[in-house]
Structure formats: C-alpha cells, structure tokens
Image (spheres, grey):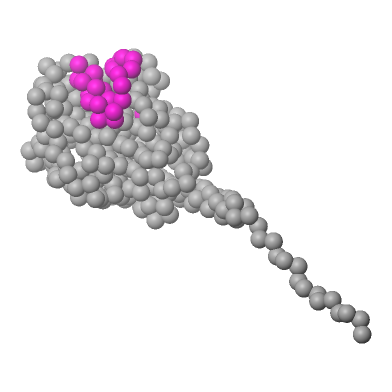
Amino acid sequence: MPHARAILPSPVTSPPAGRDFAAWYFLFKWLRVGLAGLAFLGFWVGATVMAFGIFPFLQLRNRHRSRFERAAACQAWLQRTFTFLHDYMRWCGLLRFNPRDVRRFLLPDGAPLAAASPLAGGGPVPRALEHLPSFDTLPSFFTLPAGGFVLVANHPTLVDVAALSGAFGRLTCIAKSSLFRSPVVGHILRACAYIDGGAGDPFSGGQVVDQGAERIRAGMPVLIFPEGSRSPVGGLHPFKRGAFEIACRTNAPVVAVTIRCTPPALGKGRPWHDIPRETARFTVTPLAVLCPSDFQGNSAAMAAACHDLYRRELNLVAEGPACLGTTVSMGA
C-alpha cells in the first residue's frame, strides 16, 4: 500500500498589524470628516429655517418693539442654535466645548464688576476649578458689566462666534460685507443687528465705530475680534483700535476673554475637513475687564495694553506693532 501523504491546510498568513491599523484609521478619519460635514450641512439647514421662517415670525410678533428689542429676540434663537451646534460636535467627538459651562460662571447683568484691569493697578480675575471641560482656567465667578459692553477675544478657529454667542447670549458682532450679501446669512445678520465691517478703509471703520457705539448705548454687548481676522496658529496679529474706540466713546468696559483650541482645528488656512485625530479641546477663559477711564480715554493705549495682556496670557513673545488703525472687521 503506497504511503499516503497527509494533506494539511496551508498556513494562513495574517496581514501585518500596520495594515489593519491603516484601514481602521482610514475609516475613522473619513467618519469624522463625514460628521464634520453634517455639522456644516446642519448649520446651513438651520440658518435657512431661521432666515425664512423663525426670524420673520419673531419680527412680526415683536413689530411694536424697538429695533434692538426685535434683534434681541432673534439673538436668543441664534444662541440656542449655536449651543446645539456645539452639542452636536461634542457628542460626535469633534470639539469638546459646552457653552452652558461658561454661562454657569457668569453672574447676571447688573451686579458690580468682578475684576479691575490688572494693567491699571487692579487685581487679576480669580481663578480655580480646572475640572470643567469648557474652561482652561476658571474664575470661581465672573460678573459681566451691567448694560452694554465690548467683548474682545483672540480668534483661533472658525467657530469662535458660535461659541461666544452660545455662551454670552445677547451679542452683536462685526461681520464681513460678503456675508451680508448672502441671501441666507445676510438676512440673519441684519435681523440680529450685526454690523457690516465694510471694505476695511478708514471711512468704513468710522461707520463701524458709530454703529457699535449706538448698540452699546442701547444696552447691547458688541463682540469684536480686534485682530480683524483669524489668529495665526500659535500667534496673535496686532490689534486694531476700533473695539477700544467704541469703548472709549461710550465709556463702556471691555471684557477680554481668551480662546484656546488644542490640538489646533478649523484655523486660518486650514480646510474644514482637516480634522485632528483626537477630539479638540476648546476653552474660553475670562481674562480681565478693562475700563476706558483707567487709560484716560486713549483707545490706542488701551489696545496696546490689551494686546500685551493677551501676549502674556498666551505665552507669546512680543513681535511687531501691538496696535494698528481704527478699522475693525471680523475675519472668517
């Protein structure tokens, strides 16, 4: 009987572990890109509903009220929308930020100021409690000034306006002229009494200052990014004087807050689909309240001092001029 050969199955060669990782990472990356795309798509759908449905109804319902009272009603809905946008991004692991955490530490309007300018001899805002996700360092409380004030911040990401509007509520902002020409976004901006930043020339800058002062006198806070555009990665552009000129003309305080996003995401020159592998941690830090009287109403000195405050807070070396002209704008 001939010797029978055993027929054994061929050994199965396992693919390298690196190949499996690359495949899973590819799927993970495009899943995150898809979730980010849905966030932007949802924003446009929501913006369309607000522009042509909710806001016209609110304006009709409040037609007997003043222009800025009608705008405040629209801003309340915009705050809810921006809060939901950040909820979605947090649930999807795209961006870790909850505007409610900021609101929890903001005392109502009408209380006395919680801090004086550290640049003018006052003490810094008290800090503690680093356990909440939406703050880098937290004050145990932070009292907003009564009535209108100027809110300034650095501008590292595309969603800074959404974050601050969701956190601070009733705000008007400076927006680029191109956004006002949009049939959807432009209607929302006008309904919320946002300010057209103009062409960036001195005449437009003067109009922006006048309109900002008008809103401050009506008790409406004004959000301005004094750099005029999104911040460079790991840096800070010189500050323009417009925000501080508005404050000096109306004797309104300037509330300075610092925004950080780690790792960097949605920054200047970075496409929206370039999503970091890990969830970005977005933080808002109340920095100081600056009073025009502490600077004798000098907007240039106020801008330079505020810029220096941000450089020290962000651990940046002094580079270039701290202050430019009076033109103000909000970069995309």
Which image quarter: residue 179? top left
Whether residue 26 sits left or right of residue 179 in the image: it is: right
Q: Residue at x 36, y 26 (%)?
A: 235
Note whether residue 256 is visible: yes
- Total of numbered circles in the picture? 0
Give the answer, above or below, for where 27 lies relative to 74: below
Residue sitting at x 14%, y 44% = 141
State the image coordinates of residue 159 (x, y, percent, origin top left).
38, 40
Quarter of the picture containing the C terminus is top left
Task: From the top left corner, tell me how far across and down residue 284 is, in percent.
Answer: 27, 40
* Residue 143 in which image quadrant: top left
Residue in view at x 31 percent, y 31 percent:
154
Q: Residue furthest left?
A: 112
- Where, by quadrant of the figure, is residue 173 drawn? top left
Q: Quadrant of the N terminus?
A: bottom right
Q: Is residue 245 above or below residue 42?
A: above
Q: Nearer the viewer, residue 41 or 113?
A: 113
* Residue 59 in sight in this render: no
Q: Foreground residue, 255 or 191?
A: 255
Percent position of residue 275, x then y: 48, 43
Instruction: Please check the rendered image and state whether residue 201 is part of the magenta-colored stretch, yes or no.
Output: no
Spot the residue most to the right.
Answer: 1
Q: Is residue 319 magenta?
A: yes
Taking 306 as reference, is 104 above or below it?
Answer: below
Q: Which residues are magenta?
A: 301-330
At x 86%, y 79%, the residue is 4
- Residue 107 x, y percent position in the rendering: 14, 45
User: Quick check: 57 left or right of 107?
Assistant: right
